[in-house]
Amino acid sequence: MFENIIAQNKAKSIVSEQIKNNKIPHAYLFMGEDGIGKKKFAFEFAKILNCSINEYTKTDIGSCGHCENCKMTDKNSFPDLHLINFDKQNEIAEKESDKNKTKLGIDLIRYMQKYVSMKKITGKWKIFIIEPAEKMTLEAFNSLLKTLEEPPEDTILILIAKHRETIPTTILSRVQSIYFQPLPEKDIIKYLEEVNSLSTEAATKIAKFSDGSIAKAEQIMLNTQNEFSSLWQELTKKKLPLADIVEKSKKASRDREEAMEVIDILTEYATADFRREPDKFAGIVNKLCEYKSYLNANINASIVMDNLFIYINSKI
C-alpha cells in the first residue's frame, strides 16, 4: 500500500496495518513540514478506502488507481471526500467581508458538520481533510471537538498541520497522531530528475538546500531559473566595487514585488549557509528579515536594496 508515496515508511506501516485489520481510527493528525507528502498520503488513503475494485481488507495492493472512484479522488471530485480549507471557506462565504485568509473559522466547521451528519453518497467512507489545521480559531476547534466526541460511523477526519504544539490538547487526545519525516535527499534528487527533468548535478544542488521538502525544492528550482539566482554567490564570495553593488541593486529594485522575491531568494541561501556556519551568517539572516520588513513598510526599494547589498558584501 501507498507505493506512490515517497519515503514515510513509518506512516505507511501504521496506517496500512489499520486498514488491513479494519481497525481504522475515526480521526487522524498528520504532522510535519510542508511538501513532504501529508496531503498526498491523505488522498491515497481515501482512494484505498473507497476503491471500487480492490477491497482494502482483502489485499495489500492498495487502490487500483483506475476505477471511477480512484479517478474522481485524484481530481478532488469524489462526492464523499471533502477538503476543508481556505478555498472552501472563501467559497461558502456569504459576502466578501466574510472571507478570511489567515484563520479557518467556526462557520467552516459548521459547514463541514452538516456533511458529516449526512449519509454517504457513493463511497464506503466519508473523508474530511482539514488543512492547515493549525490555522483554526479556538471557536472552530471547540466546535470540531463535538464531532470528535461523537463520530459518525464510516467517517474519517484528517487534520493536517506542521506542529503538534499548534493543536489544543483536547483535540490531540481524540486523534491518532502520525508524524511525517523530512524526505531523504536521494528521494528528492530522484523526484527532481524524473518529474522536473533536471540533471543529477542540478537536482543534487537543490536537494541539499531543500530541508527534506519537495515543495521547497521546487521553489528553489524556480528561483535558480531567476536572473538573480547567482546573486548570493556574487555578494558573498568576494569584495565587489561599490559601483557593481549599486548596479546589481538597481536591477533588483525595479519594483517592490521583484525586490521581495530577491530577498526571498537570498534568504534561502543565507539560511542554508547559516546552518553550516551560524556565527558567520546569523547577522545576514537577521538583516534579510529586517530589510524585507522595510519593503513591507513601503520604504523606497532602491534605498533598501542598496543598503542590504552593501551590508552583505561587507561581511565577507
Image (cartoon, rainbow, N blue to C red):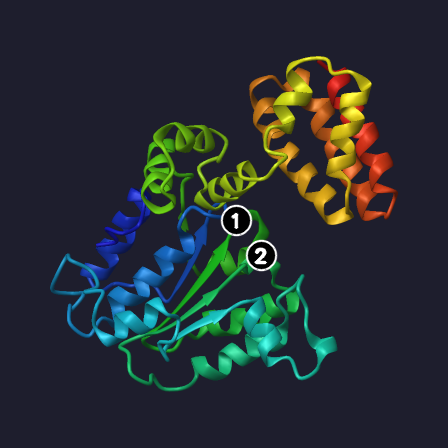
Query: Decide: marks 1, 2 in contact (CB < 8 A)?
Result: yes
Residue labelled with disc 2: 134
Can you give x and y, in whole percent of width and height, for residue 315 in the image? 74, 16
How many numbered markers are drawn?
A: 2
Given the image, on which type of amino acid does mark 2 rest?
Answer: Glu
Can residue 18 be seen?
A: yes
Q: Which mark is residue 121?
A: none
Query: Which residue is drawn at the image coordinates 27% and 74% (left, top)?
Result: 69
Q: The N terminus appears in which quarter of the rendering?
A: bottom left
| Crowd class of label 2 (few under 14; some 14 to 19; many from 20; radius 10 Å) | many
Q: Please indicate whether residue 278 sits to the left or right of residue 302 in the image.
A: left
Q: Please indicate whether residue 56 sits to the left or right of residue 252 in the image.
A: left
Query: Which residue is drawn at the image coordinates 28% and 49% (left, top)?
Result: 12
Q: Please indicate whether residue 306 sits to the left or right of residue 171 in the image.
A: right
Which of the 4 image quarters holds residue 122?
A: bottom left
Residue 271 vs 143, above or below: the answer is above
Residue 128 vs 182, above or below: the answer is below
Residue 4 vs 186, above or below: the answer is below
Query: Which residue is drawn at the image coordinates 49% and 84% (left, top)?
Result: 114
Which of the 4 image quarters holds residue 227?
A: top right
Query: Which residue is drawn at the image coordinates 63% and 34% (left, top)?
Result: 228
Q: The C terminus appears in which quarter of the rendering?
A: top right
Circle 2 SS class: helix
Residue 174 vs 149, above or below: the answer is above
Can you give x and y, in whole percent of width and height, for residue 281 in the image? 67, 21
177 and 16: which is toward the camera: 16
Given the image, on which type of amino acid does mark 1 rest?
Answer: Lys
Q: Which mark is residue 162?
A: 1
| Crowd class of label 1 (few under 14; some 14 to 19; many from 20; radius 10 Å) | many
In three-dimensional space, the C-alpha distance between marks 1 and 2, rounded to whole angstroms, equals: 8 Å
208 and 234: which is toward the camera: 234
> Of marks 1 and 2, which one's residue comes earlier in the chain?
2
